Amino acid sequence: MAQPMLKKDDDRDDEVDYHPFFGIEKGAVLQEARVFNDPQIDPRRCSQVITKVLYILNQGDTLTQIEGTEVFFSVTKLFQSKDPGLRRMMYLMIKELSPSAGEVIMVTSSLMKDMNSKTDMYRANAIRVLSRIIDGTILAQIERYLKQAIVDKNPVVASAALVSGIHLLQTSPEVVKRWSNEVQEAVQSRASLVQFHALALLYQIRQHDRLAVTKLVTSLTKGSVRSPLAQCLLIRYASQVIRESGVNQAGERPHFDYLESCLRHKAEMVILEAARAITELSGVTSRELTPAITVLQLFLSSSKPVLRFAAVRTLNKVAMTHPLAVTNCNIDMESLISDSNRSIATLAITTLLKTGNESSVDRLMKQITNFMADIADEFKIVVVDAIRSLCLKFPLKYRSLMNFLSNILREEGGFEYKKAIVDSIVTLIRDIPEAKEIGLFHLCEFIEDCEFTYLSTQILHLLGNEGPRTSDPSKYIRYVYNRVILENATVRAAAVSTLAKFGALVDSLKPRIFVLLRRCLFDSDDEVRDRATLYLKVLGGEAVVGETEKETNEFLFGSFDIPLVNLEASLKNYEPSETPFDISSVPREVRSQPLAEKKAPGKKPTGPAGPTSGPVVSAIDAYEKLLSSIPEFAAFGKLFKSSAPVELTEAETEYAVSVVKHIYDGHVVLQFNCSNTIPEQLLENVTVLIDASEAEDFAEVYTKPLRSLPYDSPGQTFVAFEKPDGVPAVGKFSNILKFIVKEVDPASGEVEEDGVEDEYQLEDLEVAYADYMLKVPVSNFRNAWEGMDPESERVDEYGLGARESLAEAVNAVIAILGMHPCEGTEVVPNNSRSHTCLLSGVYIGNVKVLVRLSFGISGPKEVAMKLAVRSDDPDVSDKIHEIVASG
C-alpha cells in the first residue's frame, strides 16, 4: 500500500521518502474495515485498518451517520480479541467515533466490564473512553468505580481517572466536586503524572473560590509536591495568587520565597517556569529579578537548544521593561547570534538591540547583516522594530542604522517586511532632525523600484510634507515626477499632489512645477487630470479659495479634521437651496454612538435620535434640531457641544432619568430624558427641581416641563442656565424629579382624574471643564503642532502624587481635559517608567488646542508631569494650565 510521496532525484545513493498513507481514499478504507467482521480476527491487519480510519478522521474527512454506525458496530466485535495492541487501538477508535446515545448503550456494559478487569491497561483505557462518551445518567452508575480508580495503586489507572475527571468537570461539575477527598489524597501520590493530574483537577474544582485556591497553594508550597510537572503547575497557581494579593504592608509578596526556592530545583523545567513567573510579576523590582536573570544566563550556554530558546525568549520579554537587568547577559547572547537555530539567533539579536550600549552598535550591525539573509520575513520584522528602538535610544548612531535599513529595503521581501522598514525610516525622520535628509534620500531611491502602491503613496505624501523644508528641495523633484511617468493611476495622483506641495511652499520652484503639472493635464486618468487642474488654477491665482496664501495652502494641503461620518450625515440632511452647503457647520466631535444614546440595561432610548426610517441623523444634528425648535433656546446662538447621556438613576428603578449637557457660549441647557417604567401610573407636569448653590456662576433662566409621561414612552424636560460668555463655568447641581402621579387601570387604560404630587431624588450632576472641550482628532499631530504659533506655547511641570501606575495618571489627565488622544498615545506599555501622550481638541469659542504630556514615575510611585500646550489663542493655553492645576 505504501507509495513514494517525494523523490529527491534519480541518484540511487539518495533515499526515497515514503508516506504510508499517500493517496489513501475513504471508500477503500471503509471496504477494508469489513475485516473486523471476520470470524478469525487478524490483530495486525485490524490495527492497520483502524490506523487508516483514524488518519482520515484527523485529516478533516467525516463519516456519514450510516458509515459511522457501520464502522462502530464492526469495531465493537473486536472486544473478543485478547491482543493488547489491538485492544488499545479499539478503545481509541470508539473514543474518536463519538457514538450517539443509542450506540453508547451497546458498548457501555463491555467498557464497564473492562473497567473492573484485572488487567490495568484495560481498566485505564476503559475509564478514558467512558468519560468521553457517557452522559450524566451513566456517570451516576460508575461514579463509585471512578472514585476508587483515583486512589488506585497503579499510576496509569489513577492518572486515567483524574484526566477523566478534568473532562467530566465541564459537563457534570456537581458530580466531580464530590471527589475532592480522593483527589486530595492523589495529590500526595509518589507517581509523577498522578500528582500532576491530581493538582490540575483539584485546582479546577476550587478555581472559583479565591480563598480555597490560596489555602491550596499555601499548603502545597511547604514541600509536599515532588513531581516536576506538578511543581510547574503550582508555580503558575502561586504567581496567580501573588498577582491577586499584591504587596503586603511589609512590602513583600506572599509565596515569592517559594518562587525563589524553585530557582534552585534540580529539574530544568521547574527552574524555567519559576524564572518566567518572577519576570512576569507586575511591578517587579531589580532585586527580585536578579536571581531569575542569573539562572536564565546559565541556560544561555546550555547544550540543549530548547533551554537556550526558552532562556533567550524570557530575557527578550524582560528587556522590554527592564533592559538594564539583562545587560549582564549580553556577552552570552552575542555568542547565540551564530546559533544554528534561527529562532534563537533572532531573539538574541533583538534582545541585544534593546540592551546594547552605544559602543556596541556598529559591531552588532556587522553581525546582523550576515544574519538577515537566512531568516524569514516575520523574524526580519522583529529585527527591524528592534533597530528602530535602538536608533531612538542612541540618535547619534542614526547614520549606520539608517544605512542598514536602506540596504535591507533594497533586498527581496514581502509587503509587511517592507512596510516595517519604511515605517521605521519615517519614525527616525520624524524624531531625529539630523536624519531627515538622508532618510528622504533612501526613500526616494526605494520608490524608483517599489512594487507596492501603498508604500509609494505613503512615501510621496511624506516627501510632500518634509521635502520643501530641506536645504535643497529641487533634488527630490526628479524622483517625484518619475512616478507620474512610470506608475499606476493611484501613485500618479499622489505624485501630482506632492509636486503641487513643492510649488506652493517653494517659490523658486513654482515655474518649473507648473510646467510639470501642465503635462499631467493630458493623463489618461480622471483623478490625475482633476488634481493637476485644481492645483494649477489655485496656485496660479485663477481661482481664489482664501484671502491669504496660508489659507490657500490650508485648503489644498491641510489635514481634514472633520470626521467623515459627521460629514456624510450633514450632506444627507442638507436640503438644496440658494444657501450653499457650509462645511463649518459640520460637527467636529468624534462620537462613538451617533445613532442612539447610551442607556442602562433594560432601558429604552430616551434621546431625540431614536430609531428612524428616514435619513441617517447624527446625535449632534438631532439635538440641534430639537433645541432650535424651542423658541426660548433659539436665541442662545450656535450649539457648541452636547455631552454623552449621564445616568441619574440606578438600573431597573421605577423611573429612569439621564441628562445631556448642551453647551452654548453663554448658556448651558440640561436635557433630562425621562422614562416611566410602571404600567399602572401616568406622570404629568414632570420637571426637575435643581439646587445650584454649589454652582455660583450659573443662573436659572427657564424650565420647560414635560406635560405627560405615560408608561414606556420616553420624554424630555429642560432646564436652562445663563453663565458668563465664553467662560468655562463649573459647578455641582442637586436634582429632584417632581411630578403629579395618576393611577391607570391596566385592563381598560383609563386614567383617574385626581393625581398626587410626588418627587424622586436623582443623583447629583457636575458641569466640568471637560464639557467645554470638543474631542477633535488631527491626522498628523507633529505637522499640526509645528503649524501652531510657537508664541502661544505654555509649558509647566506638575506633581500628580502617588498613583498605582502611569496608565492611571494618563487616564486621569485625559478625563480632566476631555480631549482626543492622538496616534494611540493613550495606551501605556506595562511597567513603563515614562510616557508621552498627545491630545487634540477644540475649546469653547472654536479655539484649536494641542497638548503634549510627558509623564514619569519614581520608585515610590510618585508621578510627575510636564505639560506643553499650543493653541490659536495664548489665553486658552494659559487656561488649560489653570484647569490642570485646579484638577
Image: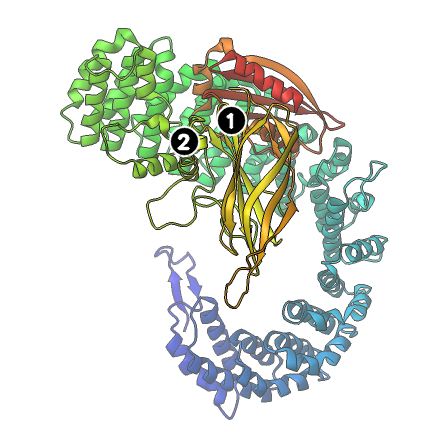
Image location of residue 864, percent across then percent down? 68, 22
Classify residue 447 as left or right of residue 520: right
* Amino acid type, label 1: His
- Mark 1–mark 2 Cα distance, whole angstroms, equals 19 Å
> What element does badge 2 sit on?
loop
Crowdedness near tag 1: few (<14), some (14–19) or many (≥20) residues, C-alpha within 10 Å: many
Figure coloring: rainbow
Q: Give the camera-side residue of 710 and 645.
A: 710
- Please give the label number shown on residue 587: 2
Which residue lies most toward the front here?
Answer: 754
Q: Where, quadrant-wise, is the N terminus in this rendering?
A: bottom left
The numbered mark, 1 or 2, whose residue comes first in the sequence reads 2
Name which residue lies at 35% across and 34% down. Answer: 567
Image location of residue 463, percent across then percent down? 35, 20
Classify residue 25 as left or right of residue 36: left
* Number of numbered markers: 2
- Please give the label number shown on residue 193: none
**In this figure, which residue is indicated by the disc labeled 1?**
667
User: From what the image shows, is residue 371 above or below residue 600?
Assistant: above
Name which residue lies at 46% across and 23% down. Answer: 781
Image quadrant assignment for residue 530? top left
- Of badges 1 and 2, nearer the viewer stands 1
> What element does badge 1 sit on?
strand
